[in-house]
Image (cartoon, grey):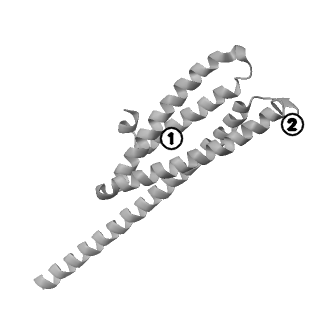
Amino acid sequence: KYSDKYSFIKGFKLGLYLEVLAFVCILFLNSPEKWWIIIPYTILYNISLAGTNANASNIIYSYVDTNYFVHATAIKNSIGGICGFGASVVASNILEAIQANGNMIFGIHVYGQQVLSIISFVLVLIAIILVALGVNLLSSTENTTQKAEGATEQIGNSTDQAVSSVGTA
């Protein structure tokens, strides 16, 4: 309902903000006694997935011709799958290195999941910035198009007025 009321892009950004909060929750999960932190993490993360996945599809549907919607969605999902696979390979190597050091980085005791959450946190912040830049680029392009259409309409009106003046003279 939020996205329908405001916009799909704002709904997408809200999903990203919730994802950032979910990763912040994991940063505090530094002992088995804090197992309960998994509950707010799971809730926030799954709500964020609903916001980003649904709005990503709606954004594609809004901006891509219906004849190419399936193709655009397939490309988006393929890129997501490739990035997800690559992220899993990189993350497993990071996790293995941390565990091989006895869960220590620079002399600080950490769990691998905390480090992966920090990395995810940074990547989601980058995504938020890219979405904001994309929205600004999109809105400036739409404004330019609207100005060009307005100028064309004014030229057309001026031409009509000139022709009607000549016709009455």
**Marks 2/1: CA–CA distance:** 34 Å
Q: Which residue is mark 1?
A: 13
Q: Residue at x 31, y 72 (%)?
A: 152
Is there any visible trace of residue 126 in the rendered image?
A: no
Q: Residue at x 60, y 30 (%)?
A: 21
Q: Residues within 10 Å of mark 2 (few under 14, many from 20)?
A: few
Q: Residue at x 65, y 30 (%)?
A: 24
Residue type indicated by callout 2? Phe
Residue 72 pos. (x, y %) = 40, 55
Helix, strand or loop under label 1: helix
Residue type indicated by callout 1? Lys
Residue 137 pos. (x, y %) = 50, 58
Q: Nearer the viewer, residue 38 or 55?
A: 38
- Image position of 165 with respect to 15: above or below: below
Q: Nearer the viewer, residue 60 or 94?
A: 94
Q: Residue at x 37, y 68 (%)?
A: 148
Q: Between tags 2 and 1, which lies in front?
A: 2
